[in-house]
Amino acid sequence: MPYHWVKITSSPRPARRDKAKKDAADNGGRLCEGQLFYDAAGQGYALVEVPSDANGQKKVLDAMDVTSQHGLLVDADGN
């Protein structure tokens, strides 16, 4: 399964993280390590594992209300 770095709306922080994690899982994805990171401006960023097919990826990213993405990343071993 590929990965996407995504930017999502960010507050409130603990509740937003939990919602992003649930939304990803409910739609066939995974919020990696259950983490959501914030920059100095309070914008939220997450690494999300998504299904291999385009429709599955769209379903996960739409459910998470992604505002931008950098997708189709693979790990160092090519997965």
Image (cartoon, helix red, strand yellow):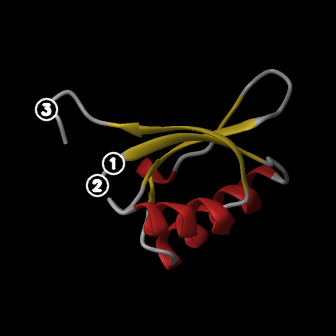
Residue at the image position 86 percent from the left and 25 percent from the top: 41
Dot placed on the residue nearer the N-terminal end, 3 or 2:
2
The residue at which mark 2 appears reads as 1
The answer to whether residue 11 is above or below residue 47 is below
Question: Which residue appears at 20% of the width and 27% of the height?
Answer: 76
Secondary structure found at label 3: loop
Discs 2, 1 touching: Cβ within 8 Å: yes
Q: Position of 29 compared to 42: left or right?
A: left
Lateral position of residue 11 relative to residue 33, left or right: right
The numbered disc on residue 77 is: 3
Dot 2: few (<14), some (14–19), or many (≥20) neighbours within 10 Å?
few
Q: Secondary structure at mark 2?
A: loop
Give the image location of residue 48, x and y in percent: 47, 50
- According to the picture, the residue beneath numbered tag 1 turns out to be 2
Residue furthest to the top: 40
Q: Position of residue 6 (x, y in %)?
A: 60, 42
Name the kind of residue labelled 2 in the image.
Answer: Met
45 relative position to 34: left or right:
right
